[in-house]
Amino acid sequence: MATVREPDAASDYLPARMLNEFVYCPRLYFYEHVEGVFVHNRETVEGALRHAKLDDGKGELTPADELAADDKLHSRSVTLASETHRLIAKLDLIEVAGGAVVPVDYKRGSPREDRKTGELIAWDPERVQLAVQGLVLRDNGYTCDEGVIYYVATKQRIRVPIDDALVAETLAAMQAARDVAAAGVIPPPLVDSPKCPRCSLVGVCLPDETTSLRLHKTNGQPVQQTLFEVDPPLSAQALDRPAEEEEIRRLVPARDDLRPLYLNTQGLRVGKSGYVLKLQEKETVVQEVRINEICQLNLMGNIQITTQAVQALCEQETPIAYFSMGGWFYGVTHGLGVKNIYLRREQFRLADVPGFCLRLARALVAGKIRNQRTMLQRNHVEPPASALAFLKEMQLDAERAEAFDVLLGIEGNAARVYFQHFAGMIKLDDPIAPRGEAADFNFDFRNRNRRPPRDPVNALLSLAYSILAKDLTIVSHTVGFDPYLGFYHQPRYGRPALALDLMEPFRPLIADSAVLSAINTRMVTDRDFVRAGESVALRPEGRKGFFRAYEQRMDTLVTHPIFGYRVNYRRVLEIQARLLARVLTGELTTYPVFTTR
Amino acid sequence: MRNTFLVCYDIADPKRLRKVFKTMRDFGDHLQYSIFECQFNAIDLARCRHALGELIKHNEDQVLFVDLGPTDGRSERVITALGLPYTNLDAPCIVV
């Protein structure tokens, strides 16, 4: 699909380390070299810290023609390039003895044992990387016949002869890597590879998930609604397919171990010292929060933040979201983010293809209606059979809607019926006796109203949708989308249309559910509201309670209907956005909408 | 997945002690004199060990890393207090 590359990119110098990645996994190479994605994990951090120590060398090396035959030298972190092969390499250590130079590369792991001979040998990607270093040295006039890999874990040196066979292998890999970059099409993931679980990009790449969805495509059995094919939409029975036969390894962590930070106290000031955010009220520090323990910073209303804090958060790629005091979502500050422009290019191209937009919109709306139905079925005191039947019908209609306005009508009808019965899911068993002035609030719910919400339940729903839109805007950014261009929601000034698209199936599952549990478990009570004219708003205490309910919901583990493993909703949002990206770049034909059973 | 760690240090020189204390504030909560409570994942632990390893004098000082197991659902199971109360934050988000 995405076949666009800057014309001169192929002639750029290729770093030796990227060739290592390419031999390890072409897809990893594509992510890191072409898309500029990099994610740290324990292995990469340890490697980086180790190199930080090595890299304090001067980076000098006596030129080849000045090298005397009996010179014995050690040079650290030398960067050299080869003009003939257009390769560049950073050499950890170069040992010069007897006129020959030997590059030494430090690796954190351990060597592998040859199956037949039992001999310790270097891994293929590392041999290739060393060969590049050898080629670069030769091109600069040095004699280099072998290299050494030093394994830090086992403290062993493994010699690698740089012979013609290795050079040929290396040059072939180099050509293949350049071809992949020039084609601009991401290579398929490795299949069931033992390399994946410890790869730092596994949460971005989703190897097993992608493979399983691709396999279903070739079997002629799309998992859910087909987006590119013209055949009639699948029946509800197909949507109800049980978890897949073959089990998918759960490679992504079940939950994000970072927590969101919500600042709700008006007049708070956010400063930074070291890697710690200092939250100050007047002159006193109210709380300290370490930057690497939060995944987002939400500022509700009048809260000041220093440039130093903003810079530190941008550097950590921790987004800052801004809301009005009442919870209206204004926007996000982000670091430089994903450089992946191909995805955005496909997004803009496909947003102009009405057929594609309609098919995606159908899937999203049908998924939302299905999830609304599930909500009623699970949580209503007395699930109304007629409403459930109606929602089922609407879901099927949505799957075959012929036009956007028809789809909008179906969505509206379903929402009307769903909210008619919404009150049945509010189950406060012991309504608190009226307490004087606070008694003019209750959790009776008649219909959905907004701008402004006119009763407590609607106020909660509005706030919930607002922060869910925030979360999906952030996710869209993380994945590399432009959140403001959607496929179902039309672009309008300041509206994160793509986030709203992605959000449809999650409205009932996350937002409505969080509202219900906030009310039913009394995390928010009738005392937490205040009326201003027609509108009803939450008091700061009530907002606090609601954020907790919402984040509790986000942290709930849920079984992924297609992949069959348990992850929390926060991860689900990201996985779904990444799957949509796969559909846009053509790697998958179907977008599997998230529905629960 | 994060584990709760107690990081305890014994530093022979006041200047280094000060530096270690300052560094540890980026990694965890100051629990008692020379003891920090940290919620580490593998990355943070590697970073912390590296940072302290650069600071301390290896033949005079000592830092202990005590792993108290997974942070999730730890509640009062792992640490209990006598005297002044010990509070542990186990919420899905931080609201101020």
Image (cartoon, coloured by chain):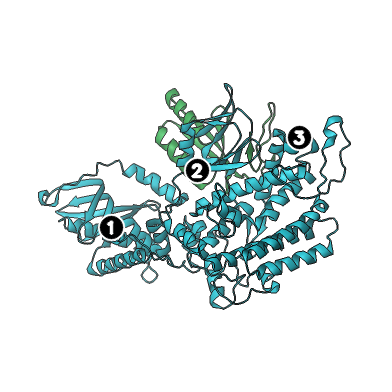
Using the rendered image, report if marks 1 and 2 lie on a common chain: no
For residue A109, the mark is none
Image spot of residue A539 (x, y percent): 72, 34
Drawn colour of chain B? green
Q: Distance of mark 2 from mark 3, alpha carbons?
A: 46 Å
Q: Earlier in the sequence, mark 3 or mark 1?
A: 1
Q: Single out the residue that lies furthest toward the top.
A: A283
Under mark 2, the amino acid is: Asp
Query: Compared with residue A331, is residue A354 higher up or lower down, i.e. above or below?
Result: below
Give the crowd class for mark 3: few <14, some 14-19, many >=20 residues within 10 Å: some
Under mark 1, the amino acid is: Asp
Whether residue A274 is visible, yes or no, is no
Chain name for mark 3? A
In this rendering, position of residue A369 left or right of residue A283: right
Image spot of residue A304 (x, y percent): 55, 30
In this rendering, position of residue A344 left or right of residue A169: right
Query: Compared with residue A283, is residue A517 higher up or lower down, i.e. above or below?
Result: below
Query: Which residue is under mark 2?
Result: B44
Q: Residue at x 82, y 38 (%)?
A: A441
Mark nearest the camera among 2 and 3 is 3
Query: Which residue is under mark 3?
Result: A531
